[in-house]
Image (spheres, rainbow, N blue to C red):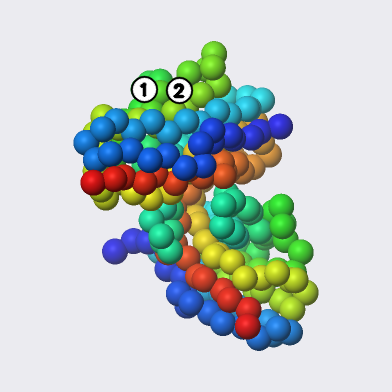
Amino acid sequence: DGGITQSPKYLFRKEGQNVTLSCEQNLNHDAMYWYRQDPGQGLRLIYYSQIVNDFQKGDIAEGYSVSREKKESFPLTVTSAQKNPTAFYLCASSKRTGIKVYNEQFFGPGTRLTVL
Amino acid sequence: AQSVTQLDSHVSVSEGTPVLLRCNYSSSYSPSLFWYVQHPNKGLQLLLKYTSAATLVKGINGFEAEFKKSETSFHLTKPSAHMSDAAEYFCVVSDRGDNFNKFYFGSGTKLNVKP
């Protein structure tokens, strides 16, 4: 079965702790993305990566970090510098079909992070 | 600049009646447009997409959308609502003129289906 997996489904963090959210895809997609979703708002882009070992900041990158060491994996670390991390986090991927042209994005099931 | 406006934050219909979810966009170039659906605490699922082929796009679960360039609209419709359609729907624009095909999300429309 091809798809995107995210783990854990629920995550609880104490203030001052860093946590890492996992995202894995077996779709052989080139690009991967992290979004944050808050109630009543659309998705906001945190980071994205078009190729291995390269990634760019999105609209709300402060307090987050990522790595892209393998094509299949794009973990997101929520650091203690992120002042309001409680949210639903969604990972997505898409296939490149041309120079800087990508197909639709496929989404994982999400991770709900709560700061205690 | 690219943007998406979903004109209704909540829509309520009775089962068996038509559904209309409205979306307007702004785009500098030739856009690709998408509708996604999200059930509670789940990821987003693609319903349909427009990528400059036919202006009337058919998607999954009986949904369709019409691209109207003159009105900069991409409204989502379904002839007859089902209880399982209750979810949140997102309109998305992706602009090929961008350096990277960034997705711009609307703020979402929650669809309630009454029995």
Q: Is residue B11 above or below residue A105?
A: above
Q: Is residue B72 left or right of residue B98?
A: left
| Callouts 2 and 1 on one subunit | yes
Task: Kindly identify which chain the residue marked by label 2 belongs to.
Answer: B
Q: Does residue A101 appear anywhere in the picture?
A: no
Q: Which mark is residue A75?
A: none
- Viewer-proximal residue among A64 and B74: B74
How many other residues sit within 10 Å of disc 2, few (<14), some (14-19) or many (≥20)? many
Cα–Cα gap, marks 2 and 1: 6 Å
Above or below, A114 against A43 in this view is below
Q: Secondary structure at mark 2?
A: strand
The image quadrant that residue A108 belongs to is bottom left
Q: Which residue is mark 2?
A: B67
Q: Label 1 is placed on what type of residue?
A: Leu
Q: Which residue is mark 1?
A: B56
Residue under the point 58% across and 34% down: B5
* Residue A78 vertical position relative to residue B27 in the rendered view, above or below: below
Name the quarter where the C terminus of chain A is drawn.
bottom right
Sequence-first disc among 2 and 1? 1
- The chain ID associated with circle 1 is B
Can you see residue A83?
A: yes
Q: Position of residue A81 (x, y in %)?
A: 77, 74
Query: Residue B12 placed where, x, y %?
Result: 38, 40
